[in-house]
Image (cartoon, grey):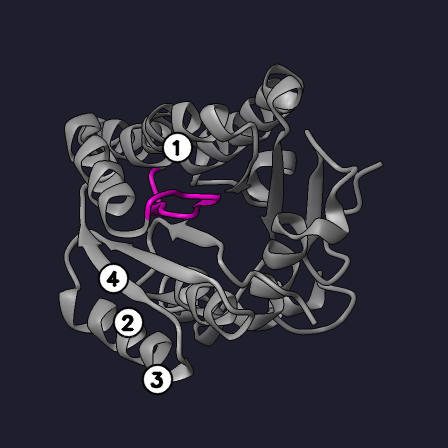
C-alpha cells in the first residue's frame, strides 16, 4: 500500500476521468489533495467531498492551465493552505479530432496552450518551492499518441510527444535537487473524453488492437501514477511508464 501521509498532491484536471481517480487514490493513501478544475465546479466539489470523507484535507481550485497567472495564483493559494506541494500531477489536457487538411487553428492553439504550456506553467510555479526543500515529484500524463502518432489528432499527438521530451529534459535537470520527474503514458481509457469513441462504430476495432482486449479504467491509470510518485520509484527519473494493455510496446 502506498503511504503519502503528510504529503500534498496537486492534480491538474482533477475533476474527472484519470485526474479524479488519481485525486481519490492519493487521498486513500493519506495525501492532502489540491483538485484543479477549469469549468466543472460541481464535479470538482464531489471529488473534494469524497477526499474529505476519507479523512484527509482537500481543496478545489479553479484555474485555466493555459493561463500562466492563473496557475501562479493556484500554486500560491495551495502553498498558503498547506505549506507545500510535494507532488505535481500534470494531467489536464484536451483531445479533439482536427485533420490536417481542415485544421481548426483555434483548436490547434488551444491544444498547444493546455496540453503543453499548461504543464510548463505548472512546473515553473511549483519547482521553486520544491527546490527550496530539495524534494519533490512531478508526473506528466502523456499518451500512446505521443509515441506512435494518431491519425486525425496530430495536434494532440504532438503535444503528448512534447510531454515525453519535457520529462526526459526535466529529469536530469532537477535531479541535483532530489526532484524526480516521470511520465505515465496511457492508451485507451474509459473516460468521458473517450467514451463516445469506445461506444461508437470504431469501438470494436479499437479493442482489437489492445492485446488485453479492452480499454483501461481510470483507476488502472491512477495506480501507476501513484507508483511513480511514491518512494517505491525513488530510483526512477526521466522515464516513461506505458499503461496501455499492450497496445504500444516501446523499448
Query: Residue 239 location in percent, x, y?
Result: 71, 34
The magenta segment:
83-98
State which mark lies toward you, 3 or 1.
3
Residue under numbered circle 4: 59
Measured in 3D between alpha carbons, the distance from the residue under mark 2 to the one under mark 3, in whole angstroms, is 9 Å
Toward the right, the furthest residue is 251
Q: Is residue 91 magenta?
A: yes
Work out whether 97 lies above or below 55.
above
Answer whether labels 3 and 1 touch (C-beta < 8 Å): no
Q: Main secondary structure of the magenta part?
A: loop
Of helix, strand and loop, which one carries label 2?
helix
Q: Is residue 141 above or below residue 35?
A: above
In primary-sequence order, the first of circles 4 and 3 is 3
Residue tagged 2:
48
Q: Which residue is mark 3?
A: 53
Q: Nearer the viewer, mark 2 or mark 3?
A: 3
N-terminal of the two: label 2 or label 4?
Answer: 2
Task: Check the image and name the residue furthest to the bottom.
Answer: 53
Amino acid at each position: 500500500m502506498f503511504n503519502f501521509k503528510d504529503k500534498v498532491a496537486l492534480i491538474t484536471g482533477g475533476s474527472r476521468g484519470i485526474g479524479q481517480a488519481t485525486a481519490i487514490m492519493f487521498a486513500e493513501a493519506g495525501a492532502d489533495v489540491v483538485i484543479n478544475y477549469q469549468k466543472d465546479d460541481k464535479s470538482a466539489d464531489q471529488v473534494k467531498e469524497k477526499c474529505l470523507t476519507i479523512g484527509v484535507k482537500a481543496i478545489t481550485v479553479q484555474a485555466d492551465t493555459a493561463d500562466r497567472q492563473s496557475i501562479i495564483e493556484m500554486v500560491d493559494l495551495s502553498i498558503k493552505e498547506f505549506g507545500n506541494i510535494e507532488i505535481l500531477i500534470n494531467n489536464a489536457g484536451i483531445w479533439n479530432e482536427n485533420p490536417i487538411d481542415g485544421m481548426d487553428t483555434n483548436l490547434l492553439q488551444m491544444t498547444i496552450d493546455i496540453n503543453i504550456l499548461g504543464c510548463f506553467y505548472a512546473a515553473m510555479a511549483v519547482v521553486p518551492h520544491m527546490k527550496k526543500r530539495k524534494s519533490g515529484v512531478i508526473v506528466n500524463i502523456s499518451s500512446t499518441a505521443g509515441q506512435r502518432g494518431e491519425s486525425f489528432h496530430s495536434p494532440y499527438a504532438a503535444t503528448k510527444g512534447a510531454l515525453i521530451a519535457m520529462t526526459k529534459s526535466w529529469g536530469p535537470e532537477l535531479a541535483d535537487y532530489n526532484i524526480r520527474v516521470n511520465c505515465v503514458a496511457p492508451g485507451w481509457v474509459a473516460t468521458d473524453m473517450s467514451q463516445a469513441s469506445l461506444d461508437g462504430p470504431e469501438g470494436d476495432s479499437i479493442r482489437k488492437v489492445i492485446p488485453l482486449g479492452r480499454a483501461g479504467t481510470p483507476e488502472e491509470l491512477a495506480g501507476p501514477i501513484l507508483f511513480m510518485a511514491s518512494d517505491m520509484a525513488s530510483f526512477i527519473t526521466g522515464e516513461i511508464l506505458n499503461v496501455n494493455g499492450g497496445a504500444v510496446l516501446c523499448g
